Amino acid sequence: MMQKKDKEKLEKKIFELQRGLAIVVAILIFLGQLSIIGVFVTPRGFRVTLAGPITGSSRLQSNTNNPIVNTFIDAINLVIAKLLIIDQFRITGTVLTHNGFTVNCGGPLLGTARTQPKIPKIVSEFDNFHEVVCRFFNIDPKVFREYK
């Protein structure tokens, strides 16, 4: 069982990782490597889907190359990047597609709760991962003892 202090420390590290991912995605939006390509509708709200050259897709642009539509898409991208930077949006996951992958993000503005780490599940999945790796690769479980 994890002590409260260790749990808080792990939650802080996970939050820092989530913030770092959000900042990286915002930078990729500013660099034109990610762009909105769609929206997932779920019972609890919406999630914005991002993809671009870095994920194996192309940037979303107007079919007719209309500069007004392209400017509107760029404005939406800038709003998404700003929401990621000010922690109103968080990365909620990725989806593998036939030509790459997408990054999904959302937050309270779109009706989804901010993602929060669930420590007990992480710890049990961490233990399960090590058990499977040790069994599959025939590794002594004591090798991973220091990481638990």
Image (cartoon, rainbow, N blue to C red):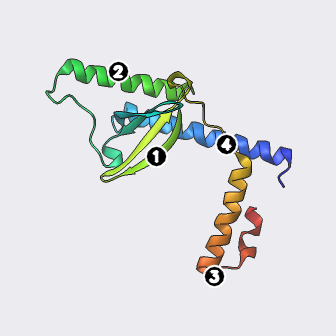
Q: Secondary structure at mark 1?
A: strand
Determine which residue is flagged by label 2: 75
User: Which amino acid is tagged 3?
Assistant: Asn
Determine which residue is flagged by label 3: 138
Percent x, y for residue 21?
Answer: 53, 41
Determine which residue is flagged by label 4: 117
**In the image, 93: left or right of 3?**
left
Q: Residue at x 75, y 75 (%)?
A: 142
User: Which amino acid is tagged 1?
Assistant: Thr
Q: Earlier in the sequence, mark 3 or mark 1?
A: 1
Disc 3 and disc 1: Cα gap in Å? 31 Å
Disc 4 and disc 2: Cα gap in Å? 31 Å
Q: Earlier in the sequence, mark 4 or mark 1?
A: 1
Residue 106, numbered circle: none
Q: Residue at x 27, y 20 (%)?
A: 71
Q: Earlier in the sequence, mark 1 or mark 2?
A: 2
Q: Residue at x 68, y 60 (%)?
A: 126
Q: Secondary structure at mark 4?
A: loop
User: Which amino acid is tagged 2?
Assistant: Ala
Determine which residue is flagged by label 1: 94
Nearest to viewer (mark 1 / mark 2)? 1
Q: Earlier in the sequence, mark 4 or mark 3?
A: 4
User: Which amino acid is tagged 4?
Assistant: Pro
Q: Image height check: is 18 above or below 70? A: below
Q: Secondary structure at mark 3?
A: loop
Of 119 and 24, the residue lying toward us: 119
Disc 4 and disc 3: Cα gap in Å? 31 Å
Q: Image height check: is 19 above or below 145? A: above
